């Protein structure tokens, strides 16, 4: 169930998120040519270097027979036959906890499907893949009495840190709440019910849940709420297709919402975990048309809601509803924001600061005609997290009066040896000794994962 959290290891998502985040960011260097270099200009170049964590050695062998069986079954888990892979997974689980010590560690080289299977195996064996795993729990609050929607949402934000906005005229509506130490979604769902509101997937500001007036909110489809996450069915359609995928297909569109405080940067939908059961005299299980896919959604824009689509093959015309639709979602949750500040920019000395798993070194700050170039070396212990950490980074200057000076342009440039580079351009009107360079970024990522189940969903 939602939501366990484990050390972030998502190599399969890395390239997809890298392309999405950096290709869609408007950091064009063409803006630089528009600058009038009448003042000093500082070019800040960040080289981001990642360090691969060491993989610890396995425990000593206790049973040669079990080790050999696990080794053989692990090979079968990479078979091209789905039935053989499923059978091998069940056989490893049947060996019991003694098999756990011979399972490989999940690392940056573990394939997407193997990662999920290993996590399922270790969960059933009672030996989680990441012993240091903790839980992301739902926020809780107490909101009671008669009040307007606006007052209720303000109280909820004060207690949970979750900002909720409403489109329409519902903010002034009077509602009656009686919630003591209830979860964020319990209270929010009650507000939505009384004020006839629904989740709006498009937000006005950053990191806020957007609700909108719904004249006839559906009462027959209940959302799936699990911890800080919520899944709503948005639309369902059945269509007849031709060609290679000929037949009737069922398309289910859902909105996925989360507590805004979490600020996830990516969502993955493993289709092999999705199961749809159609009600009837004899229950029918529908199969996804793309069972091996793992759609990745980069959550770089504002808001606390996104949409997912699941397509199934072989639905019969006579079927009236989905008895159950269940699956698993994976979220990348950023760590706490870390700040690194460097003064005495004219000293020429190397300066190093470490915060958590991030170490930043100001290697040099040198003048080149009318520009100043600062080189920062950023070392991150989790190599697979570096790209996502850069999605939330920023650099700026502080002058002698502590006024913040934003960069006038920035861009990505190719690094070397597995590094990534970012460039910032600042326009300053004084001596660099009077300025401080500030660099901020998230200090690592964690993976929140868990199951969901929607029930009694009517079919068109």
Image (cartoon, rainbow, N blue to C red):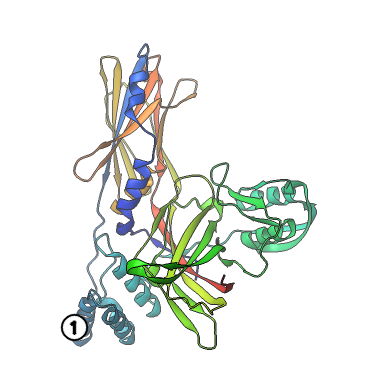
Q: Secondary structure at mark 1?
A: helix
Q: Residue 218: x, y in percent? A: 66, 64
Q: Position of residue 308 (x, y in %)?
A: 47, 59
Q: Is residue 87 above or below residue 457?
A: below
| Left or right: 395 in relation to 63 | right
Q: Disc 1 marks which residue?
A: 68
Residue 345 visible in the current orientation: no
**177 sits left or right of 306 in the view:** right
Q: Residue furthest front?
A: 242
Where does the C terminus fall, quadrant-wise?
Answer: bottom right
Where does the image place residue 52, in percent across and percent down from the top left?
Answer: 24, 53
Badge count = 1
Quadrant of residue 233 within the rendered picture: bottom right
Sort mark 1 into few (<14), some (14-19) or many (20+) by Cα contacts within 10 Å: few
Note whether 179 is above or below 96 in the view shown: above
Q: Residue at x 26, y 81 (%)?
A: 84
Residue nearest the viewer, comparing 359 with 320: 320
Q: Is residue 196 left or right of residue 362?
A: right
Residue 187 visible, this angle: yes
Residue 412 percent coordinates (x, y)? 31, 36
- Residue at 18% across, 83% down: 68
Q: Nearer the viewer, residue 245 or 74?
A: 245
Residue positioned 32% across, 28% down in the render: 29
Nearest the viewer among 270 and 344 is: 270
Camera-nearest residue between 61 and 28: 28
């Amino acid at each position: 169930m939602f939501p366990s959290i484990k050390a972030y290891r998502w190599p399969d998502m890395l390239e997809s998120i890298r392309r999405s985040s950096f290709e869609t960011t408007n950091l064009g260097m063409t803006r630089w040519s528009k600058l009038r270099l009448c003042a000093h200009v500082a070019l800040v170049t960040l080289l981001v270097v990642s360090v691969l964590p060491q993989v610890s050695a396995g425990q000593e062998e206790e049973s040669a027979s079990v080790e050999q069986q696990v080794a053989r079954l692990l090979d079968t888990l990479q078979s091209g036959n789905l039935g053989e892979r499923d059978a091998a997974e069940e056989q490893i689980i049947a060996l019991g906890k003694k098999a756990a010590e011979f399972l490989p560690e999940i690392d940056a080289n573990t394939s997407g499907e193997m990662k999920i299977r290993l996590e399922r195996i270790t969960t059933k064996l009672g030996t989680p893949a990441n012993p240091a795993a903790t839980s992301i729990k739902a926020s809780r609050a107490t909101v009671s009495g008669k009040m307007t929607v606006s007052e209720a949402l303000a109280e909820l934000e004060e207690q949970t840190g979750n900002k909720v906005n409403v489109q329409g005229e519902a903010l002034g509506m009077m509602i009656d709440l009686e919630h003591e130490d209830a979860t964020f979604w319990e209270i929010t769902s009650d507000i939505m019910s009384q004020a006839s509101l629904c989740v709006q997937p498009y937000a006005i500001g950053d990191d806020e849940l957007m609700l909108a007036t719904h004249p006839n909110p559906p009462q027959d489809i209940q959302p799936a709420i699990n911890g800080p996450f919520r899944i709503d069915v948005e639309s369902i359609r059945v269509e007849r297709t031709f060609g290679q995928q000929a037949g009737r297909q069922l398309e289910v569109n859902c909105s996925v919402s989360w507590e805004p405080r979490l600020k996830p940067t990516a969502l993955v939908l493993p289709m092999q975990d999705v199961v749809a059961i159609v009600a009837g005299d004899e229950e029918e299980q529908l199969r996804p048309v793309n069972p091996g896919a793992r759609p990745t959604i980069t959550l770089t824009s504002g808001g606390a809601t996104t949409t997912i689509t699941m397509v199934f093959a072989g639905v019969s015309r006579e079927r009236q509803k989905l008895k159950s639709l269940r699956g698993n979602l994976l979220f990348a949750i950023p760590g706490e924001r870390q700040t690194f500040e460097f003064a005495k920019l004219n000293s020429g000395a190397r300066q190093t600061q470490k915060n958590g798993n991030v170490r930043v070194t100001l290697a040099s700050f040198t003048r080149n005609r009318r520009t100043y170039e600062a080189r920062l070396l950023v070392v991150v212990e989790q190599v697979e997290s570096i790209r996502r950490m850069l999605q939330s980074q920023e650099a700026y200057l502080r002058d002698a009066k502590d006024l913040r000076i934003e960069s006038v342009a920035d861009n990505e440039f190719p690094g070397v040896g597995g590094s990534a580079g970012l460039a910032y351009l600042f326009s300053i009107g004084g001596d660099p000794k009077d300025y401080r360079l500030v660099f901020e970024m998230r200090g690592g990522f964690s993976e929140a994962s868990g199951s969901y189940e929607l029930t009694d969903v009517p079919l068109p």
